Amino acid sequence: MLSQLFVNAVIAGSLYALVAVSFALIYRIAGFFHFTHGLTFAAGAYVTFAAHAWLRLPLVAAGAIGVVAAALLGMAIRAVVFRSLARRAAPPLVMLLASLGVYVVGQNVISLAFGDSSRPLGESVISPGLAVFGARVTEAQLASIAVVAAVLMGFAVVMTTIGIGHQIQAVANDRELSEVVGISIAAIDGLVFTLGSAMAGLAGILWAIDQNMTPTMGMRALLIGVVAMIIGGQKTVSGVVLASMFLALAQNYSILFVPTAWQDAIVFLILVAFLLVSPSGFFGLRGRRRSLT
């Protein structure tokens, strides 16, 4: 049982890490809590479902369409909502409320189109899985871990060794100075929202394959991802991954002592404990005023 809980934690932690890293990427540029990240998370899964179940496309091809759809949705929300508000010098609180409003509207659109019931993505037949150190893991779960690892490693390489990654970090640290040295702020903003939304959509697809999907799935994943970002720090992929795994391990092993209904509460108890011990962790929620262009 302990080995199975560990495997479950690794699977969940990898998805938490992907959500947290993608949220942190946009948060460092935008500077406000964007609830719409939860919407792109769910949209990726539901577009994949539509392409797979209704258009009869292979799951991999449908997933690619879902990722592209999530990226396009993130671009559209930025252009129509956030960029327009930024031009009017809207404060971060207004941006946050607008983001929440877009999320609520989007969630209801998904509910109207697909219903509120839980839906499976992929094969509905339950597979016994492969035996790994006394635990059972399905091929889909192994593929999910591999995909997340590849995406996060690729992202880390881009951010630390490639010019565009350095530009993103420069804009995140000082937008005004970055513009002075010739970096296109508008281009970086658009790239970050597109890339972050695509990563969120991918996380939503992998989540739905493993746990099924509901219109509200994005909010739960978003909140856990944000906690992982706060504990692990927003600037390093390795810190966020470690925090995500720690949260997933705490969630899964907590069922040995408390009911499963406490799993999400455990995450926020850890957050409170962390902030009490190390208040500097709260910097993950502090944002400077940004001007999305």
Image: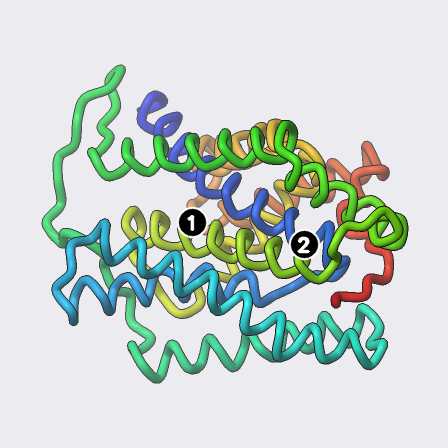
Residue furthest to the front in view is 182
The N terminus lies in quadrant: top left
Residue 203 left/right relative to 266: left
Quarter of the figure with residue 273? top right
As rendered, which of 290 and 34 lies closer to the eye?
A: 290
Q: Alpha-carbon distance for marks 1 and 2?
A: 22 Å
Q: Which residue does the image show at 67% across and 54% down from the upper left?
A: 188
Q: Is residue 83 above or below residue 31?
A: below
Q: Position of residue 247 (x, y in %)?
A: 55, 36
Q: Which residue is mark 1?
A: 203
Badge 2: few (under 14), some or many (20 or more) residues near its Cα, within 10 Å?
many
SS label for mark 2: helix
Q: Earlier in the sequence, mark 1 or mark 2?
A: 2
Badge 1: few (under 14), some or many (20 or more) residues near its Cα, within 10 Å?
many
Question: What's the residue type where badge 1 is placed?
Answer: Ala
Q: Which residue is mark 2?
A: 188
Question: What's the residue type where badge 2 is placed?
Answer: Ile
